[in-house]
Amino acid sequence: MITMDDIVREGHPVLREKAKEVSLPPSKEDKETLEEMLQYLKNSQDEEIATKYNLRPGVGLAAPQIGLSKRMIAVHFVDFNEKEYSYGLFNPKIVSHSVEGTYLSTGEGCLSVDREVPGYVPRYARITVKATDLEGNELKIRLKGYAAIVFQHEIDHLNGVMFYDHINSEEPFSIPENASVADPE
């Protein structure tokens, strides 16, 4: 079981590496690791389990965050329209994106970052992601708004990018150009 102790914190070199592709079909070990990552997210959102094991709630987790430089992400969340997303993905890649941007009015957080980092994080409003799921199926997922933000945050981890790298350092709360807020007011 993955716990908060397994999650590497900012400053760890693996968080700045470009993660390696996972060879497909995935090894038994890679598949088990990805299943555990997804289970961590489910557990972290269950109040009883989260309290018992001192888990910080998360909606996404990338393999570099547990010290593995591999292109694997897990996401588990419900968006603002009550749509559920629950995926363990190998080699996710953004294959297209909108010109329009979006951002969260509250900014973003990260399981690997133990401090508040104020500011708007500009993201694409709509993206299409290609990946392979835990069952070995090739997926093409179209995402918008909050879901698109979560996937971009996790895929950034696979490229050694932290969410705060996107924040305007001069004016952290300047509204990103051509962007609208993703969360309901």
Image (tube, rainbow, N blue to C red):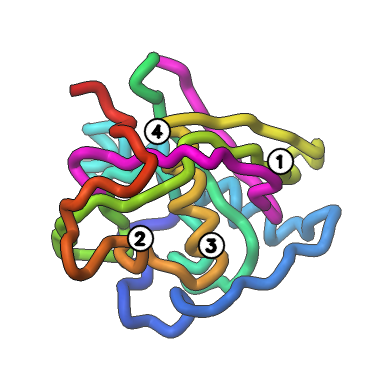
Residue drawn at x 25%, y 22% is 184
Q: Amino acid at mark 4?
A: Tyr
Foreground disc of the pair 3, 2: 2
The quarter of the picture where residue 158 lies is: bottom right
Mark 1 surroundings: few (<14), some (14-19) or many (≥20) residues within 10 A? many
How far apart are the alpha carbons under marks 4 and 3?
Answer: 21 Å
Label drawn at residue 163: 2
Tell me whether the residue at label 1 lies in contact with that at label 3, contact meaning CB atoms closer than 8 angstroms. no
Label drawn at residue 133: 1
Depth order, front residue of 175/73: 175
- Helix, strand or loop at disc 2? helix
Which numbered disc, 4 or 2, marks the residue that appears first in the sequence?
4
- Helix, strand or loop at disc 1? strand
Q: Amino acid at mark 1?
A: Asp
> Which range of residues does the magenta coloring cover?
82-107
Which numbered disc, 1 or 3, marks the residue that appears first in the sequence?
3
- Expressed as whole percent of the image width and height from the top left, the position of residue 130 reads 72, 43
Residue drawn at x 47%, y 38% is 100
Q: Amino acid at mark 2?
A: Phe
